[in-house]
Image (tube, grey):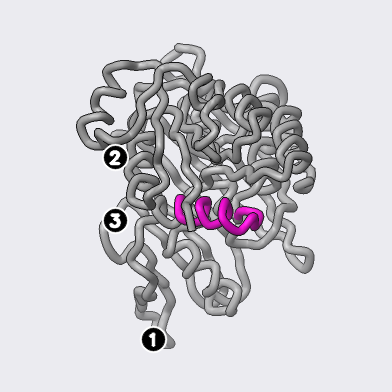
Amino acid sequence: MDLPKVAVVGCGAWGKNLIRNFHQLNVLEAVCDVSDYRLELVAKDFPEVKLWNDFNNVLASPSIKAVVIATPSDTHFDLALKSLKANKHVYIEKPMARDVKHAIELDELATQKNLILMVGHLLLYHPAVNCLKSLIASGELGELLFIRSDRMNFNMGRRDWSVLWDLAPHDISMMSYLLDTDNLEVNRVGGWDTLNDGLVDVAYLDLSFDLGHKVIPGQVRNSWIDPQKLVRLTVNGSLKSAVLNDAQSENKLALHSLSKEGRMIVEYPDYPDAEPLHLECEHFVKCLITGDRPRTDANNAYLVVNTLSEVENRLTKRPDQKIKVVKSR
């Protein structure tokens, strides 16, 4: 069976990782970028791949069945819309769009044309995240009490209006996935423009996740000005608490509990040793072949875009007002 061919649009820091993985999967046909310098770097590692400056070449190519978009977020909607109109399947990095109406339009067009529309919410493919999801579902942690995600780094190459648009899509998509709910409420929002450059670079969200039988409180903390990278999820349960520290090279997932004597016990669950991005790219290719709806589809992306759109509005108006997030479409 001939594998469907894809083109990666954008070969910056993250685009290079997508190029590598789709090449390993034997489906990469072309790379498109406005920078000749970046294309020259791609040519050194992948000399057989077609290189284009003009996005219209991607749209016009009959052999390219899918477009992988890894460009700045303010270009996502336009590139995805043109790709779908050209009857190309689309994989688009997070966030899918910056406007809820745009997210809906992309979903409706993909559905109308029977095309795959997948969003790069990477952590939903992370083996440690999926191991934790299974542990939560099995009751290993007991009754859930609290969930918090901390995502911080030092980033001066800022393109988004807020650190939340850059980092929080990971947190929101992962937390709702782990708790198996798309019913969430933003209770409180805080953000600071510490450098006075018009960009919110430190922010937090206080959340409530409605599980039906119980509401779980949670928090997201993001920063662009932290000199020490922190990528940590904590899920507190009545029996055990789980800590997923993705900045560590090993033992990323740990379960903490107290013995009857009050001694802290730490366990390290087993999970497959596989690159999350490779699993995500592999999933997209499989969906292209089978026609199955992706795990991170437009509904999953809609929850993130809708939440962050409301949060952005609240940051500039009334940060203390609760925000009820509409369910996925």
Image coordinates for residue 162, horizontal then vertical, percent: 53, 25
Q: Is residue 67 left or right of residue 114?
A: left
The answer to whether marks 1 and 2 mark residues whose Cβ atoms lie closer than 8 Å is no
Question: Would you place residue 60 above or below residue 167 in this image?
Answer: above
Residue drawn at (71%, 53%), measured in percent from left and top?
182
**Residue extending furthest toward the top:** 197
Report the disc number at residue 248: 3
Image location of residue 170, percent across then percent down:
51, 45
For image coordinates 50% across by 23% down, the residue present is: 160
Amino acid type indicated by mark 1 = Glu
* Circle 2 residues within 10 Å: few <14, some 14–19, many ≥20: few
Q: Secondary structure at mark 1?
A: loop
Mark drawn on residue 228: 2
Counting from the top left corner in percent of width and height, residue 157 is at: 37, 22
Quote the CA–CA distance across marks 3 and 2: 13 Å
At x 69% / y 51%, what residue is drawn? 208
Q: Which mark is nearer the camera, 1 or 2?
A: 2
Give whichever of discs 3 and 2 has the lower sequence position: 2
Per the rendered image, the range of residues in magenta is 281-294
With 262 as the anchor, is 286 left or right in this view?
A: right
Q: Position of residue 10 (x, y in %)?
A: 42, 27
Check if residue 78 falls in the magenta segment: no
In this rendering, position of residue 169 left or right of residue 112: left
Q: Is residue 320 visible?
A: no
Q: Which residue is mark 1?
A: 261
Q: Earlier in the sequence, mark 3 or mark 1?
A: 3
Distance, label 1 to label 2, CA atoms, is: 35 Å
